[in-house]
Image (cartoon, rainbow, N blue to C red):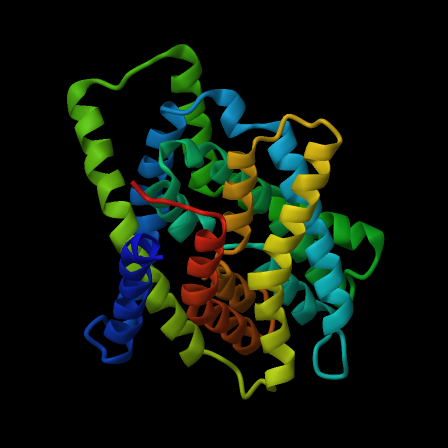
Protein backbone atom coordinates (compact mmCIF):
# COMPACT_ATOMS: atom_id res chain seq x y z
CA UNK A 1 0.00 0.00 0.00
CA UNK A 2 2.86 2.39 0.73
CA UNK A 3 4.08 2.11 -2.87
CA UNK A 4 0.57 2.85 -4.17
CA UNK A 5 0.15 5.85 -1.87
CA UNK A 6 3.51 7.19 -3.02
CA UNK A 7 1.84 7.55 -6.45
CA UNK A 8 -1.73 8.50 -5.53
CA UNK A 9 -0.96 11.02 -2.78
CA UNK A 10 0.85 13.50 -5.10
CA UNK A 11 -1.95 13.20 -7.69
CA UNK A 12 -4.74 13.99 -5.23
CA UNK A 13 -2.57 16.57 -3.42
CA UNK A 14 -2.26 18.58 -6.66
CA UNK A 15 -6.07 18.51 -7.00
CA UNK A 16 -6.34 19.84 -3.45
CA UNK A 17 -3.77 22.56 -4.16
CA UNK A 18 -5.78 23.69 -7.20
CA UNK A 19 -8.94 23.84 -5.08
CA UNK A 20 -7.23 25.81 -2.30
CA UNK A 21 -5.56 28.20 -4.76
CA UNK A 22 -8.94 29.04 -6.28
CA UNK A 23 -10.67 29.24 -2.91
CA UNK A 24 -8.03 31.60 -1.49
CA UNK A 25 -8.12 33.62 -4.74
CA UNK A 26 -4.43 33.00 -5.39
CA UNK A 27 -5.77 31.79 -8.73
CA UNK A 28 -8.47 34.24 -9.88
CA UNK A 29 -11.71 32.65 -10.98
CA UNK A 30 -11.39 34.43 -14.31
CA UNK A 31 -8.15 32.52 -14.95
CA UNK A 32 -9.70 29.06 -14.52
CA UNK A 33 -11.20 28.84 -18.05
CA UNK A 34 -7.82 29.78 -19.51
CA UNK A 35 -6.06 27.14 -17.44
CA UNK A 36 -8.64 24.58 -18.52
CA UNK A 37 -8.18 25.62 -22.17
CA UNK A 38 -4.40 25.19 -21.93
CA UNK A 39 -4.84 21.63 -20.69
CA UNK A 40 -7.61 20.73 -23.13
CA UNK A 41 -6.16 22.28 -26.30
CA UNK A 42 -2.40 22.10 -25.79
CA UNK A 43 -0.96 19.96 -22.98
CA UNK A 44 -3.31 16.97 -22.89
CA UNK A 45 -3.51 16.51 -26.70
CA UNK A 46 0.29 16.35 -26.79
CA UNK A 47 0.32 13.78 -23.98
CA UNK A 48 -2.30 11.63 -25.73
CA UNK A 49 -0.54 12.01 -29.08
CA UNK A 50 2.68 10.77 -27.51
CA UNK A 51 0.96 7.77 -25.96
CA UNK A 52 -0.91 7.06 -29.20
CA UNK A 53 2.25 7.20 -31.27
CA UNK A 54 3.95 4.70 -28.96
CA UNK A 55 1.02 2.28 -28.63
CA UNK A 56 -0.01 -0.39 -31.18
CA UNK A 57 -3.23 0.63 -32.95
CA UNK A 58 -5.08 -2.51 -31.83
CA UNK A 59 -4.46 -1.47 -28.23
CA UNK A 60 -5.95 1.97 -28.90
CA UNK A 61 -9.08 0.49 -30.55
CA UNK A 62 -9.37 -2.92 -28.91
CA UNK A 63 -12.92 -4.16 -29.70
CA UNK A 64 -13.18 -6.41 -26.63
CA UNK A 65 -12.02 -3.66 -24.29
CA UNK A 66 -14.47 -1.24 -25.88
CA UNK A 67 -17.36 -3.76 -25.70
CA UNK A 68 -16.83 -4.54 -22.00
CA UNK A 69 -16.38 -0.92 -21.00
CA UNK A 70 -19.28 0.43 -23.06
CA UNK A 71 -21.67 -2.26 -21.85
CA UNK A 72 -20.88 -1.32 -18.26
CA UNK A 73 -21.21 2.40 -19.02
CA UNK A 74 -24.62 2.00 -20.65
CA UNK A 75 -25.91 -0.13 -17.78
CA UNK A 76 -24.68 2.45 -15.27
CA UNK A 77 -26.34 5.29 -17.20
CA UNK A 78 -29.78 3.68 -17.33
CA UNK A 79 -29.58 2.37 -13.76
CA UNK A 80 -28.57 5.78 -12.39
CA UNK A 81 -31.33 7.58 -14.31
CA UNK A 82 -33.92 5.09 -13.05
CA UNK A 83 -33.01 5.49 -9.37
CA UNK A 84 -32.47 9.27 -9.54
CA UNK A 85 -35.84 10.43 -10.89
CA UNK A 86 -38.04 11.99 -8.21
CA UNK A 87 -40.00 15.17 -7.56
CA UNK A 88 -36.73 17.16 -7.24
CA UNK A 89 -34.58 15.43 -9.89
CA UNK A 90 -36.14 15.45 -13.36
CA UNK A 91 -34.84 13.76 -16.50
CA UNK A 92 -32.31 16.44 -17.49
CA UNK A 93 -30.69 16.44 -14.06
CA UNK A 94 -30.89 12.64 -13.81
CA UNK A 95 -29.14 12.34 -17.19
CA UNK A 96 -26.23 14.56 -16.13
CA UNK A 97 -26.04 12.68 -12.84
CA UNK A 98 -25.81 9.46 -14.87
CA UNK A 99 -23.02 11.00 -16.95
CA UNK A 100 -20.88 11.69 -13.88
CA UNK A 101 -21.70 8.19 -12.59
CA UNK A 102 -20.39 6.58 -15.79
CA UNK A 103 -17.71 9.04 -16.97
CA UNK A 104 -14.49 8.78 -14.93
CA UNK A 105 -11.83 11.45 -14.98
CA UNK A 106 -9.69 9.44 -17.39
CA UNK A 107 -8.46 12.37 -19.48
CA UNK A 108 -7.19 14.80 -16.87
CA UNK A 109 -6.31 12.22 -14.20
CA UNK A 110 -6.68 8.61 -15.34
CA UNK A 111 -4.17 8.33 -18.18
CA UNK A 112 -1.15 9.68 -16.24
CA UNK A 113 -2.19 8.04 -12.95
CA UNK A 114 -2.69 4.56 -14.38
CA UNK A 115 0.48 4.79 -16.46
CA UNK A 116 2.36 5.78 -13.28
CA UNK A 117 0.87 2.81 -11.40
CA UNK A 118 0.93 0.14 -14.12
CA UNK A 119 3.42 1.29 -16.72
CA UNK A 120 3.12 2.53 -20.33
CA UNK A 121 1.14 -0.56 -21.40
CA UNK A 122 -1.85 0.84 -19.45
CA UNK A 123 -2.19 3.71 -21.94
CA UNK A 124 -3.95 1.63 -24.62
CA UNK A 125 -6.92 0.39 -22.53
CA UNK A 126 -7.33 3.79 -20.82
CA UNK A 127 -7.39 5.61 -24.16
CA UNK A 128 -10.11 3.15 -25.27
CA UNK A 129 -12.23 4.32 -22.33
CA UNK A 130 -11.60 7.99 -23.18
CA UNK A 131 -12.88 7.46 -26.72
CA UNK A 132 -15.91 5.46 -25.54
CA UNK A 133 -16.96 8.13 -23.05
CA UNK A 134 -16.37 11.08 -25.38
CA UNK A 135 -18.36 9.62 -28.27
CA UNK A 136 -20.98 7.31 -26.72
CA UNK A 137 -21.57 7.91 -23.01
CA UNK A 138 -21.60 11.72 -23.18
CA UNK A 139 -23.66 11.79 -26.41
CA UNK A 140 -26.27 9.44 -24.91
CA UNK A 141 -26.60 11.41 -21.67
CA UNK A 142 -26.85 14.77 -23.44
CA UNK A 143 -29.50 13.31 -25.75
CA UNK A 144 -31.47 12.09 -22.72
CA UNK A 145 -31.12 15.49 -21.06
CA UNK A 146 -32.27 17.37 -24.16
CA UNK A 147 -35.16 14.95 -24.77
CA UNK A 148 -36.72 16.30 -21.58
CA UNK A 149 -36.78 19.87 -22.88
CA UNK A 150 -40.10 21.14 -24.13
CA UNK A 151 -40.20 20.90 -27.89
CA UNK A 152 -37.50 18.22 -27.95
CA UNK A 153 -39.38 15.42 -26.32
CA UNK A 154 -39.93 13.53 -29.55
CA UNK A 155 -37.63 10.92 -30.97
CA UNK A 156 -36.51 13.46 -33.55
CA UNK A 157 -35.57 15.92 -30.80
CA UNK A 158 -33.52 13.32 -28.95
CA UNK A 159 -31.82 12.32 -32.20
CA UNK A 160 -30.97 15.94 -32.95
CA UNK A 161 -29.57 16.35 -29.44
CA UNK A 162 -27.44 13.21 -29.86
CA UNK A 163 -26.11 14.52 -33.16
CA UNK A 164 -25.22 17.85 -31.56
CA UNK A 165 -23.44 16.01 -28.76
CA UNK A 166 -21.55 13.91 -31.31
CA UNK A 167 -20.50 17.06 -33.18
CA UNK A 168 -19.29 18.43 -29.85
CA UNK A 169 -17.19 15.30 -29.32
CA UNK A 170 -15.73 15.70 -32.82
CA UNK A 171 -14.76 19.28 -32.02
CA UNK A 172 -12.88 18.06 -28.95
CA UNK A 173 -9.12 17.94 -29.66
CA UNK A 174 -8.52 14.80 -27.59
CA UNK A 175 -9.83 12.16 -30.03
CA UNK A 176 -8.03 13.88 -32.91
CA UNK A 177 -4.74 13.84 -31.02
CA UNK A 178 -5.27 10.13 -30.29
CA UNK A 179 -6.08 9.50 -33.96
CA UNK A 180 -3.00 11.38 -35.13
CA UNK A 181 -0.88 9.41 -32.69
CA UNK A 182 -2.42 6.22 -34.07
CA UNK A 183 -1.44 7.26 -37.61
CA UNK A 184 2.14 7.84 -36.48
CA UNK A 185 2.11 4.44 -34.75
CA UNK A 186 0.84 2.56 -37.82
CA UNK A 187 3.12 4.37 -40.25
CA UNK A 188 6.13 4.30 -37.90
CA UNK A 189 6.51 8.06 -38.35
CA UNK A 190 8.50 10.42 -36.14
CA UNK A 191 8.29 14.17 -35.68
CA UNK A 192 11.29 16.32 -36.54
CA UNK A 193 13.51 17.05 -33.54
CA UNK A 194 12.28 20.58 -32.68
CA UNK A 195 8.61 19.60 -33.15
CA UNK A 196 9.09 16.54 -30.93
CA UNK A 197 10.73 18.73 -28.29
CA UNK A 198 7.69 21.06 -28.27
CA UNK A 199 5.31 18.10 -27.99
CA UNK A 200 7.37 16.64 -25.14
CA UNK A 201 7.44 19.95 -23.25
CA UNK A 202 3.67 20.36 -23.50
CA UNK A 203 3.03 16.69 -22.72
CA UNK A 204 5.24 16.85 -19.62
CA UNK A 205 3.22 19.82 -18.35
CA UNK A 206 -0.12 18.06 -18.82
CA UNK A 207 -0.26 16.01 -15.63
CA UNK A 208 0.49 18.65 -12.96
CA UNK A 209 -1.49 21.40 -14.70
CA UNK A 210 -4.46 19.10 -15.37
CA UNK A 211 -4.61 17.96 -11.75
CA UNK A 212 -4.32 21.54 -10.48
CA UNK A 213 -7.08 22.52 -12.92
CA UNK A 214 -9.40 19.78 -11.62
CA UNK A 215 -9.26 21.34 -8.16
CA UNK A 216 -9.84 24.84 -9.51
CA UNK A 217 -12.78 23.69 -11.66
CA UNK A 218 -14.33 21.93 -8.66
CA UNK A 219 -14.13 25.14 -6.63
CA UNK A 220 -15.65 27.16 -9.47
CA UNK A 221 -18.47 24.64 -9.90
CA UNK A 222 -19.26 24.87 -6.19
CA UNK A 223 -19.38 28.67 -6.38
CA UNK A 224 -21.81 28.57 -9.30
CA UNK A 225 -24.02 25.89 -7.75
CA UNK A 226 -27.71 26.74 -7.57
CA UNK A 227 -29.13 26.29 -4.08
CA UNK A 228 -28.71 23.34 -1.73
CA UNK A 229 -28.84 19.70 -2.78
CA UNK A 230 -30.16 17.04 -0.37
CA UNK A 231 -27.58 14.40 0.52
CA UNK A 232 -29.77 11.61 -0.88
CA UNK A 233 -29.73 13.29 -4.31
CA UNK A 234 -25.97 13.18 -4.79
CA UNK A 235 -24.24 10.75 -2.39
CA UNK A 236 -25.75 7.56 -3.93
CA UNK A 237 -24.58 8.64 -7.40
CA UNK A 238 -21.03 9.24 -6.13
CA UNK A 239 -21.06 5.76 -4.56
CA UNK A 240 -22.31 4.26 -7.84
CA UNK A 241 -19.34 5.89 -9.58
CA UNK A 242 -16.74 4.66 -7.13
CA UNK A 243 -18.05 1.18 -6.31
CA UNK A 244 -20.78 -0.09 -8.62
CA UNK A 245 -19.17 1.08 -11.86
CA UNK A 246 -15.79 -0.68 -11.32
CA UNK A 247 -17.53 -3.76 -9.90
CA UNK A 248 -19.73 -4.01 -12.99
CA UNK A 249 -16.71 -3.62 -15.31
CA UNK A 250 -14.92 -6.37 -13.38
CA UNK A 251 -17.90 -8.75 -13.53
CA UNK A 252 -18.49 -8.15 -17.23
CA UNK A 253 -14.77 -8.57 -17.94
CA UNK A 254 -14.61 -11.85 -16.05
CA UNK A 255 -17.70 -13.07 -17.92
CA UNK A 256 -16.05 -12.12 -21.23
CA UNK A 257 -12.95 -14.07 -20.25
CA UNK A 258 -15.07 -17.10 -19.38
CA UNK A 259 -16.67 -16.88 -22.83
CA UNK A 260 -13.22 -17.00 -24.41
CA UNK A 261 -12.86 -13.32 -25.33
CA UNK A 262 -9.24 -12.19 -25.75
CA UNK A 263 -9.21 -9.94 -22.68
CA UNK A 264 -6.07 -10.23 -20.58
CA UNK A 265 -5.94 -9.94 -16.81
CA UNK A 266 -3.84 -6.80 -17.21
CA UNK A 267 -6.40 -5.15 -19.52
CA UNK A 268 -9.20 -6.00 -17.09
CA UNK A 269 -7.23 -4.51 -14.20
CA UNK A 270 -6.69 -1.28 -16.15
CA UNK A 271 -10.38 -1.07 -17.12
CA UNK A 272 -11.57 -1.70 -13.57
CA UNK A 273 -9.22 0.88 -12.07
CA UNK A 274 -10.23 3.38 -14.78
CA UNK A 275 -13.87 2.88 -13.76
CA UNK A 276 -12.85 3.37 -10.10
CA UNK A 277 -11.60 6.90 -10.81
CA UNK A 278 -13.67 9.87 -9.60
CA UNK A 279 -16.14 11.57 -11.91
CA UNK A 280 -14.90 13.78 -14.75
CA UNK A 281 -14.65 17.33 -13.42
CA UNK A 282 -15.46 19.01 -16.75
CA UNK A 283 -18.99 17.56 -16.71
CA UNK A 284 -19.84 20.37 -14.28
CA UNK A 285 -19.07 22.90 -17.04
CA UNK A 286 -21.16 20.86 -19.46
CA UNK A 287 -24.11 20.75 -17.04
CA UNK A 288 -23.87 24.50 -16.56
CA UNK A 289 -23.90 25.03 -20.34
CA UNK A 290 -27.05 22.91 -20.78
CA UNK A 291 -28.91 24.47 -17.85
CA UNK A 292 -28.92 21.37 -15.63
CA UNK A 293 -28.70 21.44 -11.82
CA UNK A 294 -24.99 22.21 -11.68
CA UNK A 295 -25.04 22.21 -7.88
CA UNK A 296 -26.01 18.53 -7.78
CA UNK A 297 -23.47 17.60 -10.45
CA UNK A 298 -20.71 19.56 -8.68
CA UNK A 299 -21.46 17.83 -5.38
CA UNK A 300 -21.35 14.40 -7.01
CA UNK A 301 -17.98 15.19 -8.58
CA UNK A 302 -16.59 16.71 -5.38
CA UNK A 303 -17.76 13.78 -3.25
CA UNK A 304 -16.41 11.18 -5.66
CA UNK A 305 -13.06 13.01 -5.88
CA UNK A 306 -12.64 13.23 -2.11
CA UNK A 307 -13.67 9.61 -1.49
CA UNK A 308 -11.65 8.28 -4.43
CA UNK A 309 -8.38 8.99 -2.67
CA UNK A 310 -9.20 6.12 -0.33
CA UNK A 311 -11.38 3.93 -2.57
CA UNK A 312 -9.10 4.08 -5.63
CA UNK A 313 -5.94 3.46 -3.59
CA UNK A 314 -7.65 0.52 -1.92
CA UNK A 315 -8.81 -0.90 -5.27
CA UNK A 316 -5.26 -0.68 -6.65
CA UNK A 317 -3.96 -2.47 -3.54
CA UNK A 318 -6.60 -5.21 -3.84
CA UNK A 319 -5.54 -5.80 -7.45
CA UNK A 320 -1.97 -6.24 -6.29
CA UNK A 321 -0.61 -3.23 -8.14
CA UNK A 322 3.10 -2.77 -7.56
CA UNK A 323 4.37 0.54 -9.00
CA UNK A 324 7.89 0.28 -10.32
Q: Is residue 78 left or right of residue 37?
A: right
Residue 293 percent across, percent down from the top left: 59, 75
Q: Is residue 22 visible?
A: yes
Residue at image location 57% in from the left, 69% down from the top: 238
Q: Is residue 164 visible?
A: no
Q: In what quadrant of the picture does the C terminus appear? A: top left
Q: Is residue 104 left or right of residue 21?
A: right
Residue at image location 40% in from the left, 18% down from the top: 185
Residue at image location 40% in from the left, 70% down from the top: 218
Q: In the current view of this chain or complex, which residue is farthest to the top?
A: 187
Q: Please state which of residues 30 and 195 is positioned toward the viewer in this rendering.
A: 195
Q: Please state which of residues 132 and 151 is positioned toward the viewer in this rendering.
A: 132
Q: Please state which of residues 187 and 320 is positioned toward the viewer in this rendering.
A: 320
Q: In the current view of this chain or complex, which residue is farthest to the right?
A: 154
> Where is 299 relative to 323, above or below?
below
Residue 143 percent across, percent down from the top left: 70, 54
Residue 275 percent across, percent down from the top left: 55, 52
Residue 204 percent across, percent down from the top left: 23, 41
- Determine which quarter of the picture holds residue 14: bottom left
Amino acid sequence: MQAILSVTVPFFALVLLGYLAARRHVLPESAIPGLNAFVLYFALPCLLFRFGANTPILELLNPVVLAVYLTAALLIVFFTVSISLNERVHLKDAAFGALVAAFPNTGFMGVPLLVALLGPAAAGPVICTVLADLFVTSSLCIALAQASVKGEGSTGGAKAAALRALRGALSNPLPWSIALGGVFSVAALQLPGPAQAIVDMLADSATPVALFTIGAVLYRAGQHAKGRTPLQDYLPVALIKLFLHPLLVLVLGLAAQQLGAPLSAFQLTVLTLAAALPSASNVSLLAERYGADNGRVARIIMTSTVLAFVSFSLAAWLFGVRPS
